[in-house]
Image (cartoon, helix red, strand yellow):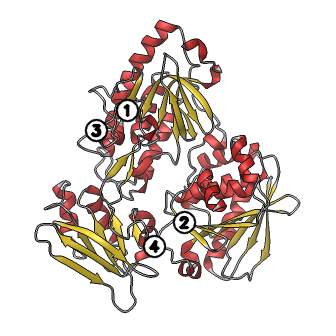
Amino acid sequence: MEKTKKYNQDKLYDVIVIGGGPAGLTAALYLARAKYRVLVLEKEQFGGQITITHEVVNYPGIAKTSGKELTETMRRQADAFGAEFLLARAEGLDLAGDVKMVRTNKGDFYCLGILLATGAHPRTVGFTGEEEHKGQGVAYCATCDGEFFTDKEIFVVGGGFAAAEESVFLTKFAKHVTILIREEDFTCAAAVADSARNHEKITVITDTVVEEVAGEGGLDYIRYKNIKTDAVTEYRAKNGETFGVFVFVGYAPESELVENLVERDEQGYIITDAQQKTNVTGVYAAGDVCIKPLRQVVTATGDGALAATELEKYVAALQRKTGIAATAPVAKRQEAPESQAPLSHAPEGGQLFSSDMKSQLQAVFAKMQQNAILKLYLDDRAVSRELESFINAFASLSDKLSVQVLDRHASSDTAPCVKICLADGSETGLSFHGVPGGHEFTSFVLGIYNAVGPGQVIDDDLKRAIQSITKPTDIKVLVSLSCTMCPDAVVAAQHIAAQNPNITAGVYVLQHFDELRARHNVMSVPCIVINDRQISFGKKNIEQMLALINQ
């Protein structure tokens, strides 16, 4: 069997970790430190689900942090020991034989051992109106969408850790929060539950299920039932007001990749032994994709560490048996933009860009094939002054970037705006409306990189599909800078526009464009608007964005 697997030594790893959350990052740290060559594949963003948690206070040894900060520290630790990272989607596995193959949208990779750390995604409930009102009243991420319900009533569905913690967070925005719990009480730790139960802006109703939500231009009606008494409660907002419904009812495992390959339980969770080993030799699993009684960052890191140490033993034995070995990892590399972990945009020592960020940006700028002009369209708001200052500071980092102010009195419908243009002044079709900070800084940099070349690698079939679109198409991606799901949609839209002159992609930070938000009744991000008519919510990759365009 091994003779049929032809591979380039550069694409051979000791271990490939599929999933860049706490479990995967911990495993990468342990394996790289033990001098094994390890690749971490992540389809969305490094850090996993915990990155949407604004406050982490129960991770031992760290008094208080955010999910994003915690996992970025993990990533940097693994990187320092030589772990490699690639933003790519695993699409198939060949688990036969000693050398295994992982097929991705960015090529095939080979390894001796595999760690499945793909995590889980939020579950839906299935009440009437849930699917219809996703993004327009029904939400699943308090950090991303809480601000859209400022001074409104909010109903939270669920009774676990997420429901209790996020309900408290939502009180920062909501007029009042009502938690609807199916069980007799919260199912999480008492300390977490008490924070919600004792909050002056929160009401807790137990033994209750939601049956229906409805409304025009937002939710104004909800019906829920007590499962013990069958008593039905109907709430209808008054005076044209609307409310939000946030669903936190647990997660479903991201295990479709190994369907019919690795043993799973009836819910799709991967079955492992006490050493995190699956029923397939050389394949291990860790974190929320596994059967486990507690899904927390601390248990995910424990899983990752245990799986990594077991993989160390497995790989060492296999190397002795076969003589096959991957190239040893190197201690700190300059990575291509497409494999880079997200940049941050936090001031350091009074500087807009930290020294570490500057070095990462220089690696991107060095690869750019053409110069770029960043054209500014501004109005008289403070955010326009902020954008101008930001873009001037950003462009000063490279002689391949220059800035032109085209209009200081542009319409507030589009300003503040920066358009990415080529050296001859021609437009690429990419624009950013607002200040590209927060989670959108990396996508802004990638937009420039994709527009001026060489750009992130995409396969030939996908490129042909993009270039086959002949009808003029305008894509607006409406975002919040705090949303971790928005960058995927932004990068996909910009990459498509960079490949096809018939397509434009504009990114709008919604807090600065109230009229646009009201026009499309946006209560969740990312919101994708095609030709000002067709609306879709949620993160999208290139294939999904193309499907929207071609509808």
- Eyeballing the image, is 551 above or below 72? below
Q: Which quarter shows the N terminus?
A: top right
Q: Distance between the residues labelled 2 and 3?
A: 33 Å
Q: Which of marks 1 and 4 is in front?
A: 4
Secondary element under disc 4, as helix, strand or loop, is loop
Q: Do the residues labelled 1 and 2 touch (CB within 8 Å)?
A: no
Secondary element under disc 2, as helix, strand or loop, is strand
Residue to which mark 2 is pinned: 536
Quarter-of-image position of residue 458: top right
Res. 136 mark: 4
Disc 3 residue type (three-letter): Ile
Q: In this view, does 117 lie to the left or right of 234?
A: right
Q: For mark 3, does the 10 Å Cα neighbourhood hold few (<14), some (14 to 19), or many (20 or more) residues?
A: some
Disc 2 residue type (three-letter): Ser
Q: Is residue 409 left or right of residue 257?
A: right
Q: How far apart are marks 1 and 2 (CA)?
A: 33 Å
Residue to which mark 1 is pinned: 285
- Eyeballing the image, is 346 above or below 218? above
Image x and y of residue 57, in percent:
30, 53
Disc 1 residue type (three-letter): Ala
Q: Which quarter shows the C terminus?
A: bottom right
Whether residue 347 is visible to the viewer of this picture, yes or no, is: no
State the residue in front, 79 or 40: 40
Q: Residue at x 59, y 32 (%)?
A: 332
Image x and y of residue 122, in percent:
37, 54
Quarter-of-image position of residue 345: bottom right
- Eyeballing the image, is 224 above or below 550? below
Residue to which mark 3 is pinned: 291
